[in-house]
Image (tube, rainbow, N blue to C red):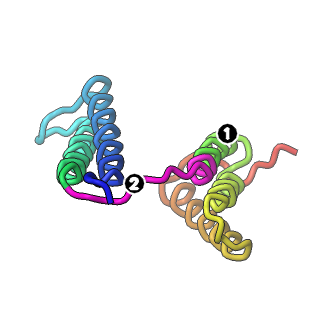
Amino acid sequence: MHNRDYRDIAGGALILVVGLIAAYMAFSGMKIGDLRRIGPGMFPAITGILLALLGIAILVPALSRSGARVRVQLRPILAVSAAIVLFCLTIETMGIVPAVVLLTVVSALADSRSRPLTTALNAAALALIATVIFKFGFSLSVPILSLPW
């Protein structure tokens, strides 16, 4: 055991930084408005502030309690990062279904215990849900399936 909870310190600091960045971007680049006439930056600003406060609430108590040392695992970080990049690169050119399937399959590589059948079922379900929500629910102009060949 160590004299600090490094896992919560790292998690709280990450949430705090993300919240501060979101609030800064909302305040510096968007109109906030007021409570009677909310501007497009109000929600990101409030969300950023709440995230920063949550990060502080996690970080401060962790400084005075003991916990196990954090072990950084590179495989999940790389798999999830690659999945997000692939999704961004394929959503407009291939469509929402292939992009979500790629996102799910590459994200599943983060866990060594993931099984092909479970991954395939998750990919199919998430592609269907994403299509229904974003294409039909929000009427976004994202193609459902647009293979380049």
Kindly identify the residue that appears in the image at 61 percent across and 64 percent down: 111
Kindly identify the residue that appears in the image at 21 percent across and 32 percent down: 32
Kindly identify the residue that appears in the image at 18 percent across and 32 percent down: 33
Rendering coords of residue 79 (x, y %):
63, 51
Neighbours of disc 1 within 10 Å: few (<14), some (14-19), many (20+) = few
Q: Is-magenta flag for residue 30?
A: no
Question: Is 147 rendered above or below residue 131?
Answer: above
The amino acid on which the numbered mark 2 sits, given as a three-letter code, is Arg
The quarter holding residue 108 reads: bottom right
Kindly identify the residue that appears in the image at 72 percent across and 41 percent down: 93
Quarter of the picture containing the N terminus is: bottom left
Residue 38 relative to residue 88: left or right? left
Question: Is 93 rendered above or below residue 136?
Answer: above
Badge 1 is on which residue? Answer: 89
Q: Which residues are magenta?
A: 65-80
Quarter of the picture containing the C terminus is: top right
Q: Which numbered disc covers residue 69? A: 2
Q: Which numbered disc covers residue 74? A: none
Q: Judging from the image, what secondary structure is the residue with disc 2 in? A: loop
Residue 44 relative to residue 113: left or right? left
Q: Is residue 50 visible?
A: no
Rendering coords of residue 99 (x, y %):
67, 52
Rendering coords of residue 39 (x, y %):
24, 35
Q: Earlier in the sequence, mark 2 or mark 1?
A: 2
Question: Is 114 rendered above or below residue 18?
Answer: below
Along the viewing direction, whichever of 134 and 52 lies nearer the viewer: 52
Neighbours of disc 2 within 10 Å: few (<14), some (14-19), many (20+) = few
Q: CA–CA distance between discs 2 and 1?
A: 36 Å
Q: In the image, which is nearer the foreground, mark 2 or mark 1?
A: 2
The amino acid on which the numbered mark 1 sits, given as a three-letter code, is Leu
